[in-house]
Amino acid sequence: MPIPPSRKPKGDSTPVTKGGPLPDFLRNPALPPDLPGDEDELSTTFAILIRTHPEALNFRATDLNTLDSVTKRYLLGDMYKALGIKPLKRLGS
Amino acid sequence: MSATQPVTLTFDDFPKDVRLGDCLRQVEVTAKCVPMTRALVKTKIDAGWWSGVGRERKLGEPDHDWSWDTLFGEVKANANRYGHGWVVQTLDGEVQGAVLYSVNALSMKENDALGKPKPAVFINYLASAPRNRVHLNEPLSGRYRGVGKALVKLTIAHSYYLGFSGRVNLMCVDDSRTRGWYENLGFEQTRTWGDATVFLELPEGQAAHYLASMVV
């Protein structure tokens, strides 16, 4: 799709961040790296939501190991809905 | 819980197509945000990003000595499963930008009802490919526009899906061009560290603007 002359891009002015590891004072102590559960993304999201919004689902993080991925996905969907999180449709530009 | 409908509410399922401005052909093109892998980092970033950039110009960039392979390993080692890496990849397979972030961070601006900091996503490293930076390619323009913003929006979306309301923070060099870019996106300064590090955070209210554009 052609771009109108008024919006012609000239390049990305994105600078770089300074970069670096997460400083200790910004590290969330509620999310220890030894949290039980699988190493996949679904478990991570699930575990974080349980810890950040325990009111959304009466479920203990230690029970994560007992769940299969399909069940986790359904429970995760329930938790998203309980939190009022709607699906995003696009990333855009 | 519905037993028949698949759940499509996860960050994994979120479409990660992105529109970039192609400054060479003066058209908009579609690219994809894809998970960072060591193979992509080695072959498409560390081995090729700086080719064609003069030595002096390269040394003037704060990321000229970054080894993304090392940084990727560092973030994955330190943040474990809470560390994430994504790249913007165009249809020709080239990587146009990369971001590494951790989802186990705290907000520097917003506290919960108990006075404790709310959770946030922390951007460890973010850069667009040197070929896209205007100041490195003068008098020509950079190749693609919109890479960095797309990666920031991706972190906002991930923050949203984790229940963090889009809160994202980072630290950047105390440089007017760098800070100006983030402030244009809505980031606000929260504190300084040492003599050259500035902490910036995108508050919930600003993140809501980006999230609204992603819902449509």
Image: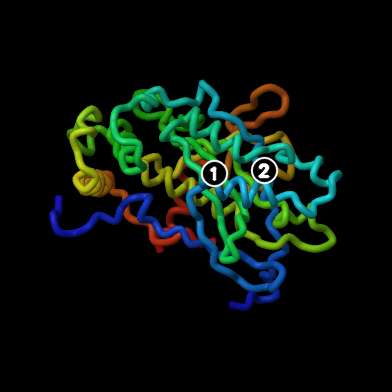
Residue beneath disc 1: B38
Which residue type carries mark 2?
Val
- The residue shown at (43%, 57%) is B212
Residue B12 shown left or right of residue B213 in the figure: left
Which residue corresponds to the image point at 40% horizontal and 64% vertical from the top-left? B216
Q: Dividing the picture into quarters, in which one does residue B120 lie?
A: top left
Number of callouts:
2
Look at the picture and state if A77 lies above or below A92.
above
Whole-Å distance between the Cαs marked 2 and 1?
20 Å
- Give the percent coordinates (x, y) of residue B1: 15, 50
Q: In which quarter of the image is residue A49?
A: top left
In this view of the protein, which residue sits in the foreground, A38 or A29?
Answer: A38
Residue at 25%, 32% in the rendered image: A54
Amino acid, disc 1: Arg
Q: In this view, does B208 lie above or below A60?
A: below
Q: Which residue does the image show at 62% across and 78% down from the upper left?
A: A2
Quarter holding the N terminus of chain A?
A: bottom right
Mark 1 is surrounded, within 10 Å at the Cα level, by few (under 14), some (14 to 19) or many (20 or more) other residues, namely: some
What is the x, y in percent for residue B197?
67, 29
**Can see residue A82?**
no
Query: Would residue B155 appear left or right of A2 to someone viewing this image?
Result: left
SS category of the residue bearing label 1: helix
Asked if A29 appears above or below B3 in the picture, the reply is: above
**Place of residue A74 in the rendered image (x, y in percent of width and height, measured from the top left):** 21, 48
Q: Residue A16's mark?
A: 2
User: Is B131 placed left or right of B117 in the picture?
Assistant: right
Q: Quadrant of the C terminus of chain A?
A: bottom right
Query: What's the chain of the residue with tag 2?
Result: A
Report x, y in % for residue B71.
59, 35
